[in-house]
Amino acid sequence: MWMFLAKLCTFLVSLSVATYFLPLLWLHWFCKPQDLKRKYGATWALVTGASQGIGRAIAVKLASQGLHVVLVAIDDDQLETTKRQLKAEFPNQQFRSVGVDLSVDPQVYMKKIVEATQDIVVQIVFNNAGYLSMGFFRQHDIEKLIGNLECNALSAIRISHHFMKQMIENGCPGCICFTASAVSFLPSPFASMYGASKALLSHFASSLAVEARDNNIDVVAVHPSYTRTNLYANTPKLFILNLLDRFAATPEQVADVLIQSVGRVILRDTGGYAFITKLVSRVVDIGVVTYFMMICRKLLPEYRAFSKRN
């Protein structure tokens, strides 16, 4: 009996690991970079969080493929600087900037996005915008927490809903892409809203992919590990962040993974942190992981740093 259970457990663990790594190896060894303009016969793409970091890298790569790009980001000098730089680098492409705050009233930002795109057909959507707010859940104003959720996840859902309907009405193929995060694989205390919002994106993407199949719309969510962007600019210089920074990917590398993955897989992990935490979540019950973190919470540098706040 015990021998049978041991063999069964070995088989299940092996199956879990194999079904995780085989698609990754297939993508790495056999899938070449792809041209999304040619793949979907598209003219326009839209990228949120496009003024810097991963979003800017995505916009650059799309423009290099001959696509015109709608740049959605906070209405500041950085957005206009990015637009000006892209115009100089790609003089044959068109760029439209939409300055909005995706963490506030959705009626306001959706109105601006809809108005800016009403005369074009957007077939490629990259939902990339998001920000990280760290600390104990109780230490944040509830409206700011809801704003974080709005920016990281709900805005992506609203934008996807609008452009998916537009693609279907026009009979156009296309893709909807999400920048999620490897943080969502395990509990993320002291960044609870960030982890939860990214987990929402992953689950939403996997469900939407099934629905969108009949309409020739591909859906993908990528889970990057630590990436060198301004996401962590306003966070404390914690040991774990300093450690991860040594192995961090560049925005350009994440953008390459996103574009390579579209239409080939639904969920894609990238980076060592993502691989390790995903395997832990597949092998060890998440409740056990959570309980272990509860017991060891006071040993975490984040706990010591944030518990000093009121």
Image: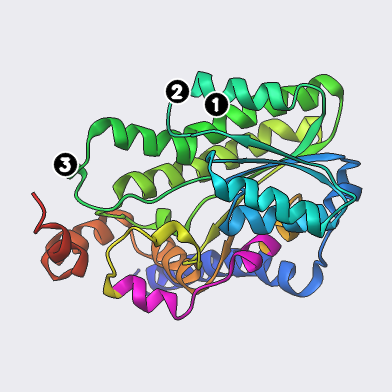
Q: Which residue is drawn at the image coordinates 60% and 20% (left, top)? A: 111
Label disc, if present, on residue 105 of the rendered structure? 2
The amino acid type, in three-letter code, at marker 2 is Asp
Q: Which residues are magenta?
A: 240-256
> Which label was assigned to residue 52?
none
Residue 109's tag is 1
How far is disc 2 from disc 3 in space, using C-alphas?
A: 23 Å
Locate residue 291, reporting x and y percent.
Answer: 19, 58
Give the residue displayed 67% in from the left and 63% down from the top. Answer: 257
Is residue 247 inside the magenta stretch? yes
Labels 1 & 2 near each other (Cβ < 8 A): yes
Element class at badge 3: helix
Foreground mark, 3 or 1?
1
Crowding at dot 2, Cα within 10 Å, few <14 / some 14-19 / many 20+, comes out as few
Residue 152 lies in the magenta-colored region? no
Q: Which residue is mark 3?
A: 138
Closer-to-camera residue (205/112): 112
The residue positioned 39% from the left and 61% from the top of the image is 233
| Whether residue 53 is situated above or below residue 159 in the rendered picture | below
The Cα atoms of the two marked residues, 1 and 2, are separated by: 7 Å
